[in-house]
Amino acid sequence: MQSLMRMPARLLLVLVVCLGCPVPVLAAEASLVVDASTGAMLEAENADLPIRPASLTKMMTLYLTFEALGKGRLSWDEQIPISAHAASTVPYKLGIAPGGTISVREAVNGIIVISANDAAIALAERLGGTEDRFAQMMTARARQLSMTKTTFRTATGLTADGQFTTARDMAVLGLALMQHFPRQFPLFATRTTMFRGKQLTGHNYMLDLYPGVDGIKTGYTSASGYNVVTSVTAGGRRYVGVVMGYPTDKARDGQMVSLFRQYLQNPASPRSASSSSIGGAVGLY
């Protein structure tokens, strides 16, 4: 016992894990603020650290959905089936029984407002045939967008082996949604939606916490911590902020507000970023 007490805390933690005792796994924290017009980073902390994306994954699910709508492969009113796989996913979800259908519009609104997992899987199966195949399509599009450290395994962001992203890559995806789909992008500010007679209310509290915020997506799993990607307009310019891996939603949102106050209200503040711009973003957009 005395020898254990003399062990460094880090080695003792490893020993506890090896003995099979449950130890909480805390995600690393990361943040980034980028000027949408130039790709210049105003702030970055752990921007390239691999973190599980949680429901931020659905940003890419929606990217591919908007792309399919633009190319005529989908229509807003098309009814897509709900498979047993989609219906059996965990909440948040719209709760449609297997064999039922949902319109593309309902699915998109459900994803944006309550992060509906069944809607995300239904879209994935419609566009990719299977969720696994759609995840491969998501990763391929990520590479084309210069999201070099992101791999998707699901359409929902539910924890899966090998599914990781970074704050930098999520900023690139936020910029891509903003600039590639200007007509659809305002949907990310949707606070409520009616679904078959029931009002659904979202939980993106950033819409109320800082002036000029207009989306984009929150996310949480126990393996990732609390994440958010946020678009904001300030001083006639647009910015995208990313905060990932925080222990609570309040801590996550508080960090985002703090960053916006520091870097958007005081533009002369020095950068803490390790590089001056989002990799590849200026050339892409």
Image (cartoon, rainbow, N blue to C red):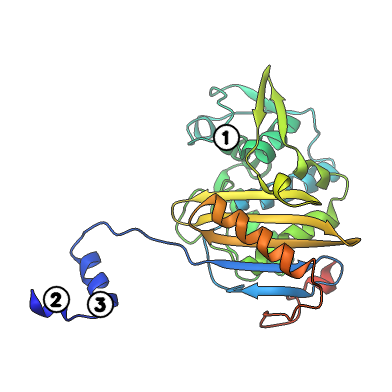
Say whether residue 16 is left or right of residue 144. Answer: left
Say whether residue 278 is left or right of residue 136. Answer: right
Q: Between 258 and 278, which is closer to the camera in this rendering?
A: 258
Residue 187, above or below 14:
above
Query: Residue 167: image x %, image y %?
Result: 63, 66
Tag 3: amino acid: Leu
- Contact between marks 1 and 2 (CB within 8 A): the answer is no
Say whether residue 177 is left or right of residue 52. Answer: right
Q: Between 71 and 90, which is closer to the camera in this rendering?
A: 90
- Circle 1 sits on which residue? 118
Is residue 140 in sight in this rendering?
A: no
User: What is the residue that sits farthest to the right in this orientation?
Assistant: 236
- Measure how far apart labels 2 and 3 are at the Cα level: 10 Å
Q: Earlier in the sequence, mark 3 or mark 1?
A: 3
Mark 3 vs mark 1, foreground winner is 3
Which disc is residue 91 wearing? none
- Circle 3 sits on which residue? 11
- Circle 2 sits on which residue? 4
- Contact between marks 2 and 3 (CB within 8 A): the answer is no
Tag 1: amino acid: Asp
Q: What residue appears at the point 89 percent right and 62 percent down from the top-left corner?
A: 235
Q: What residue appears at the point 69 percent right and 40 percent down from the top-left corner?
A: 112
Q: What residue appears at the point 66 percent right and 60 percent down from the top-left corner?
A: 256
Query: Residue 147: image x %, image y %?
Result: 67, 67
Is residue 7 in sight in this rendering?
A: yes
Tag 2: amino acid: Leu
